[in-house]
Amino acid sequence: IKVEVALKDLILGDYGKKNNVNVSSLTQSEIRDIILGMEITPPSVQRQQVAEIEAQAREQSQLTATTTKTTNVHGEQIVVTTTTQYEAATFHSKTDWRVRAISATNLHLRTKHIYVSSEDISEDGLTFVLPKNVLSKFITIADLRTQIAGYLYGVTPADNDQVREVRCIVMVPQVGNHQSVTLPKKLPDDDVLKEMEPLGWIHTQPNELIQNGMQILPAADVIMHAGITTDNPEVWKGQDEIVITSSFTQGSCSLTAYKITDAGFEWGKKNRNVAGGVANAQGYSSNCFEKVQMLLSDRFKGFFMVPEGGLGWNYNFQGVRHSAGMDYTLRMDAPARFYAECHRPQHFLTFVQMEEEQEDGADLENFLE
């Protein structure tokens, strides 16, 4: 019995020291629970919790009542009084195009800070020269989140067959998201382009893709490049065509040029129609691509070609009109910005409809005239 009493005093003394509680103030049921090992919150913590609950109850009783008056289609007035925040909070979306349209107006500032990747480049391959004027325009008409793309066309200088000079970027009708861009299956076809050779394609992306400390080409780009080459073997040979990625890094743009290897073509063809998309494709590695030499030059100027008609090249706001099998004709012109009025006619049609509804009101005689 003496041992039991000593153990009881020891347990109670330890509990009293830990929680700053006088042991003599504990009830018999609390003493029993403590000895049996149950967690007992000290009275000070209990009082704090009670105070918090009471404070919440007071706050709820002091809520501001909001009264809303609305009129339904029958002309009946409905008065609703509520103290909750139901339907009072405004919804903000990360994909709100208005915010991104304002952000896109500052893209021209990034053209002053363009960096070309020169790491892990093979010296024995072709060198591609990109004119600064078309690159600056391409970046300016882009969007920070949605990818845009264009086909590259150029020439081989007579004095050096290891160089390819890009002379034209063709903006075809397209829709995109933050991971990929969808172009029509039909390749650009125009008399102006017949004098030039296809050199691949260029696209923007929201950020660089880094794996194991190295820049890598997105798997979707390899599949798309292999698909274009497979569908048009007489135009794209697969040897001279490259993919240029323009990544929007902090306050600048980073350019990297890639060539698809034979292993990459095989992987791209095999996973072109894989179930579930690119995310379910297996076996992608750095063997599928290699970096190539690229230079920026202001020695010569380039130009753009855009689709004819008033709809422009960006179909993201009118995606129903875009399809992989669509046909288009081209003309030489400067491309419109991503959020230009011609790319989103539906927004302006809404304004017209609103004005027409207001004009359809009853004609009232103005006695003040």
Image (tube, rainbow, N blue to C red):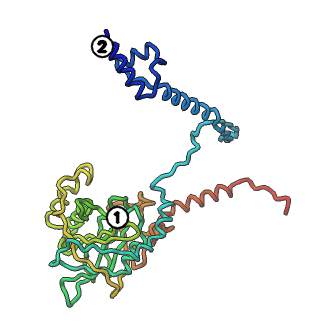
Q: Position of residue 357 (x, y in %)?
A: 64, 55
Q: Mark 2 Cα within 10 Å, few/some/many (few <14, many 20+)? A: few
Q: Residue at x 16, y 63 (%)?
A: 287
Residue on which the image places disc 2: 3
Q: Position of residue 127 (x, y in %)?
A: 22, 80
Asked if one can make out residue 23 in the rendered structure from this viewpoint, the answer is: yes
Horizontal relation, residue 134 to residue 241: left or right: right
Location of residue 2 by image quarter: top left
Foreground residue, 108 or 181?
108
Location of residue 63 by image quarter: top right
Q: Mark 1 Cα within 10 Å, few/some/many (few <14, many 20+)? A: many
Q: Residue at x 18, y 62 (%)?
A: 286
Instruction: Determine whether label 2 and label 1 are within 8 Å by CB.
Output: no
**Quadrant where the C terminus is found in the figure:** bottom right
Q: Residue at x 23, y 87 (%)?
A: 157
Q: Position of residue 79 (x, y in %)?
A: 68, 37
Q: Secondary structure at mark 1?
A: strand
* Mark found first going from the N terminus, 2 or 1: 2
**Amino acid, disc 2:** Val
Residue 39, placed above or below residue 356 = above
Q: Position of residue 17 (x, y in %)?
A: 41, 27
Foreground residue, 356 or 262?
262
Q: Residue furthest right?
A: 368
Q: Secondary structure at mark 2?
A: helix
Residue on which the image places disc 1: 205
Horizontal relation, residue 247 to residue 49: left or right: left
**Amino acid, disc 1:** Gln
Asked if one can make out residue 191 in the rendered structure from this viewpoint, the answer is: no
Q: Residue at x 17, y 59 (%)?
A: 267
